[in-house]
Image (cartoon, rainbow, N blue to C red):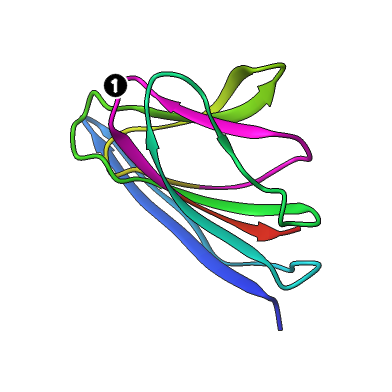
Amino acid sequence: MADISYSIQAQVTKGALNQTLSASGVTANISTTGLIATTLNLGTAATQITTTNLSSLGLCFARSLTTVETHVVTIGRLVSGTLHGAVSLRAGEAAVFRMAAGDYAANAAVADSRVVVQITEG
């Protein structure tokens, strides 16, 4: 049995466009029992996501906790103090992605935006 099981489902309806996006029963395994869960209160400067307690990076489940549409949260690689955004979350949005090795950070378009980040061991 897989260590992680999750599903993603969306219904897109705009004008003549009507499309269902679905990936159900997706499974993944983790190398070691480990998980980091943190809620970050972000400003406009990059805030590092500390992953030092994990031997390797695995799946990341992230969700913006803000309710204000203009409070976009960006997550990405941190290289020499610079955030290279890879994922942007608007108010209430969530994302699931596998993290490559490296340092990560997050910031927000508007200060006092919060995001919850859960990262499994690779």
Q: Quadrant of residue 119?
A: bottom right
Q: Position of residue 105 (x, y in %)?
A: 57, 32
Q: Is residue 58 left or right of residue 107?
A: right
Please state which of residues 8 and 54 is positioned toward the viewer in this rendering: 54
Against 66, residue 43 (above or below) is above
Say how many tags the image has. 1
Q: Identify the residue under disc 1.
A: 110
Q: Quadrant of residue 43?
A: top left
Please state which of residues 119 and 39 is positioned toward the viewer in this rendering: 39
Q: Quadrant of the N terminus?
A: bottom right
Residue range corresponding to the magenta coloring: 96-116
Find out whether residue 113 is within the magenta segment.
yes
Q: Residue at x 80, y 57 (%)?
A: 55
Q: Please, what is the three-letter code of the amino acid marked with disc 1?
A: Val
Q: Is residue 118 left or right of residue 67?
A: right
Q: Position of residue 95 (x, y in %)?
A: 47, 46
Q: Residue at x 46, y 19 (%)?
A: 45
Question: Which type of secondary structure does the marked residue at label 1 adopt?
Answer: loop
Q: Residue at x 39, y 43 (%)?
A: 115
